[in-house]
Structures are given as structure tokens and as C-alpha cells.
Image (tube, rainbow, N blue to C red):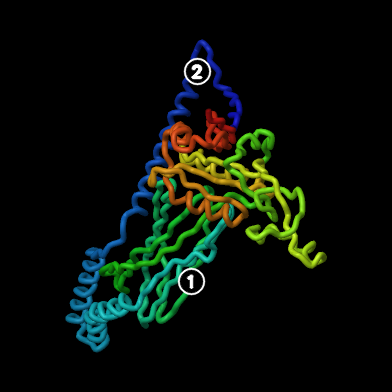
Amino acid sequence: MAIPKPTTSYNTYNQYGGYAGMSTEKSQKEQKKAEAEAKAKAKLKEKMQKPLKTVVHPTRIIAYLVMLAIVIVVYDFLRNHFMMLSLYIVASAPVFDIITCFFLYKGIEVEIAAPEKDVSRFNVGYLNLKVKNSSFCISFDMNTKLDVESPFYGDKNGMIFSLPCRAHEEFEHRIPVRYSMNGIYRYSIDSVTIRDMLGFVSLKKNMTSSAEVNVFPEKTLRADFDMSDMNRGMTESEETMKKGHDFSDVTDVREYIPGDKLMSIHWKLSAKRDMLMVKDRVSMSDQQMVVMVDLAGTAEQVDEVLTLAYAITQRLVQDQTYVRLMWWSDSNFQFEERQIMNRDNLREAFAAIYYEKIYDDPYKTKEYMRNIRPELKAYANVCIVDGAAEMVVVEQD
């Protein structure tokens, strides 16, 4: 939790009230400036979220008609071949413009692609915006609306790119994106608008192109925690195995009996004795950890919970402790769980979490756990405590 730095003010109070008045006036100016900036940002965001559509630009049409009238008047006054040629060009320009705009509309295609499907938080990922023009026409103004949605946090935004549209060419525009929060990000392009060369009209063309990027906590993140507290979350009913073992430790080696598991065969010793030898094992209930990820809180708080849960689970897996990762799904109204035995399992589990939605009540998961999963004697709960993400051991009665 960040501690605010003390601020020193030189506008101290005195009986004449001179400095205090200056401070108040300054703070009011700063407040008005901040409000103006917030309104400007909100206006820009609203503009970006507006859908692209077909629009006629009357000012450009009026300007063309004025120019055409001037050329006609000048031709009528001069009556020479140059002005007659100019009149033909100006009069036929809209016809040529409409034909080229039609072919451009048919030949333009825009796609969005994400070369990196998985990105670490605070790292830079890239999106490729591919523009393909199969016609021999050009446009000086082509706008592409790129929508960005994070279903986990319920946030949606958009941005408009003005891209060149060259004749009979395919090019790729690379967009760098820095991700500050975990989650799944969906990028989609549903339409583009192209403007004719004379600028009379902007035509909207629908597109269907999308890409997804999963953002995981940093690869270099390390979690420091007390293993003695964590061990209290391991129960007899939640047994599992360490890497290279089968729910147990080896206590003896004996001859093979039909029905023994093949993974229990001691192959090296069997080769030496020329007969199948089996490893006897004893139950190891202290090799399983149940980690409950609480998805309650604000978007920033849940993001920190995910970061801490990822670090703790990754540390346990590195220590060869298998983990059962659990979370409450509001959409399915049940506990979802995944067995985590390696890094790939961990990323698959988090990718599933990203399709859930965060909720407000931080106590319902504990209540549901007591009612639905009473056999769990204890588990590690990663949640928000006093505004910060922490791991606490919950013991059920």
C-alpha cells in the first residue's frame, strides 16, 4: 500500500488572510483546468466510440459547384481552347470519381492479426493491421475503426486509424500495445470508411476480422510467503503426486503382482534382476495445495489478486507441489477448478478465468465454499485484505 508523501505549503494562515486567499484561488484554477481536461478526454473517447458510417460532405459538393460555375463564366468570357478543355475536365471529374470509388469499395480489405497470442503484463505486444487493395484506385482518406474489449473487466474502447490506400498494393501496419493489466483483450474491425478523391462522400464497408491476446502476470515475478501456513491448506482428501511419483513416496521394492500400476514398476531394478519389480508407496497428503482465487473487488484489485495467485501457484509448481486452482464462476453458478501440474496448466487455467466476470461481494465465495465444499478442511485464499492482495489460510469447521 503506497504511503502518501507529505506536502509542504508556503501559503500558511495569518490574520490578514493574504496567502490563504492566493492558495484558494490557485486551487480553483487547477480544479477548473483538471475539469476541462477531463471533459476533453471524455469528448475524445465518445468520438472514438462512435461507429463509422456512410456520410455525404455537402461543403465539398458546394465548393465543387462554385468552382464549376467559375470555370463556366471564365470560358464564356474568354472562349478559348484551354478553358474549354478545363471545363470538360472539371465537368467529367465527378463521373470518373464515382467510378474509381466504386472499384475501390469492392477491392479494399482490412484484417487485424495478433502474432503473439500470449503476452506478459507490462510488456509490449504488437498487432498487425493488414490493408489489401486489389483495385488500381486510391483514396486519400481511409479510416479504420479498431474496437478493443476486455470482457473480464467489462471495459470496451475504440480507436480510429487513418491509413493510406495505395493502388493495387498490400501493406501491413504494425501497432505496438503495452498491457498494464492481466486479462483477455479482443480486437475487432467491423467496418472501414473510404473517401473519394474529390471528398464528396465517405462510404462505409463492413468487415469481419478479429484477434485475441491473453495477458499473463510477469514471467520474472516471484512470490515470497510462509510455507508453514501454506501447508495447512493441504488435506487428506486432496492428495496428489510430486513429479515422478504417484500419490506417494517409495517405502519398499517388491515383485510385480497382477493389477499393479505400470508407472510403479522400477524399470532399472527389473532389468538387473530380469523380473518385474514394483515400488511400494505410502500416501503423501502434504503434496497438494488448494488455492482459491477471489474475483471480488474493483478491476485494479482483482488484477493484483490474479498477479499474486499466479506467482504463488507458479512457486508451488516449481517446488513440485501440485495445486488445485479454484474460483467461483458467477455465470455458471459453481466452483470451477483446474489441476495445475506445470506452467502450461497454469496458463490454461488463467485463460479460463479471463472469461469470467468480477463481482462485488467478497464474502460469498467463503460462504459458498462452506456450503458446497465442506470436505475441504482448509485452503489458501488469495483475496483483498485492507485494500491489498494477500494470501490467507481459511480453515473450515
Specify few, some or many for label 1: CA neighbours under 10 Å numbering under 14, 14-19, or 20 or more.
Answer: some
Describe the element under mark 1 as helix, strand or loop: strand
Q: Which residue is label 2 attached to?
A: 18
Q: What residue sits 52% from the left and 57% below the top? A: 177
Of mark 2 and mark 1, the one earlier in the sequence is 2
Label placed on residue 252: none
Looking at the image, which is closer to me, 341 or 108?
341
Q: Quadrant of residue 390?
A: top right
Residue 129: x and y in percent read 46, 67
Q: Which residue is label 1 attached to?
A: 172
Q: What residue sits 50% from the left and 19% below the top? A: 20
Residue 357: x and y in percent read 42, 45
Looking at the image, which is closer to me, 128 or 19?
128
Residue 298: x and y in percent read 46, 38
The nearer-to-camera label among 2 and 1 is 1
Locate residue 173 relative to residue 72 in the image: left or right: right
